[in-house]
Amino acid sequence: MLSTDDHVEGALADGVVRMDRQQYRGKHYQVPIFDSAGPVILTPDPARARFARDPEQPVLRSLNGTWDLAQFLRPRKPVSLGALDDAEIAIFARPGVTRVLDMPIKFPDLAEYRLPRALAQLAPTLQRIIDVEHTVNPDHVEYHAYLTIDQGWVHPDSLHREAPCHVDGFQGARWHPRCRTNHSYTVSDVLPTAYYLQPFDFTGLDERVHDYFWEMNAQVADTDGAHAWWPAPAEITLMDCYCVHRGVEADARTFRTWMRLSFEERRRVFDRLGNAHNPLFDYAWEMVERDIEALHLRPFREDCDPSLRVFPWQALDGTALPPGTPKTKPALRPSFSPSSGARDRRP
Ligand SMILES: [Fe+2]
């Protein structure tokens, strides 16, 4: 069910015309409608790219490859682009940025990125990212770039974006023939995402039947989360669709700004209801309801810890949690976390 409501709580950022409200299957989204005046146009400049390039890194080696489950057997660390400095953080994390989900800011066959002016504070960080992208990816013309920005308070013992261990760009039963793989740049000013640098073996799983993310939970729990690695705060990293990750809980109430720029090949149109529309491009996708719950997948290990095989909005018995109840977290048994003061960044 879709409902649209022009009523807005709080002030709109300059460049936001209104907020549309959408909901389906109990999920609620506020989708900004952007003004097309005064856009920020970014042009990549590989000559300015700043990063320590090691072409042997698995993420760079498999860029532009097609989806291959065997790649999960090889642990892979995200590629670092270095951290934002204090001046860059002050701009990137300025309070009041408008939240968007998977909004295209680049289309295939175009080499420029178009940003509504309401998101101008992200431009310097995006420039660093696209300078690198156009250095490492000779096939950039094949790709969309989708922007997600989320800013807000993270409450103690909860995640900014509640999720199991997962990857971005999983190609399930819907994607045949297989597509080129997703690669995504992410950065957060605080509470960096945890990555699990270990092999994942999906022998015996069936993509039409089993939830692979629950099995990722289970395999991380098998190792007590011992292979977790975190970037530094404000460190920009490049991951691909084989980098298993999950957000980390806050110890105290924390204001966090997190951004992702995902590169997806031309067939991968992100037409999910709730995603923002970019008025700086001429396109009209029919937006549809789409979520993993509708696939009715099952855990591969039916007898694993119940917390590893339910959605965050479900209690351990699978029933829906009442609104306002803390989300269910997978019991990954991590031995420490960056927010608890540990400085270890294994391995
Ligand atoms: Fe993710």
Image: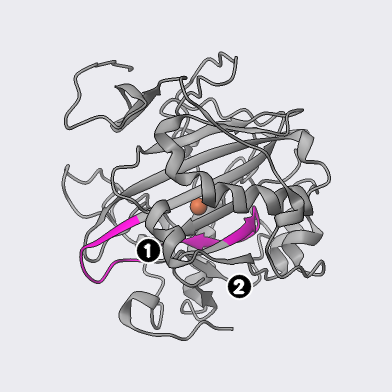
- Give me the C-alpha separation between circle 2 and circle 1: 18 Å
Mark 1 is on which residue type? Pro
Q: Residue at x 40, y 33 (%)?
A: 118
What stretch of residues is rendered in magenta? 237-256
Q: Quadrant of the C terminus?
A: bottom right
Instruction: Point out the tag, 2 or 1, that comes first from the N-terminus.
Output: 2
Could you tell me if residue 210 is visible in this image?
Answer: no
Q: Residue at x 24, y 16 (%)?
A: 6
Could you tell me if residue 75 is visible in this image?
Answer: yes
Residue that label 2 marks: 197
In the picture provided, is 124 more to the left or to the right than 77? left
Residue 152 is situated, as x and y percent measured from the top left of the image, at: 28, 50
Task: Determine the image quadrant of residue 316.
Answer: bottom left
Residue that label 1 marks: 330
Residue 252 is situated, as x and y percent measured from the top left of the image, at: 21, 69
Q: Give 61 or 312, whichever is nearer the viewer.
A: 61
Question: Does 199 appear in magenta?
Answer: no
Task: Determine the image quadrant of residue 104.
Answer: top right
Q: Give 19 or 309, whichever is nearer the viewer.
A: 19
Front: mark 2 or 1: 2
Asked if 215 appears above or below 42 in the picture, the reply is below
Q: Mark 1: which secondary structure?
A: loop
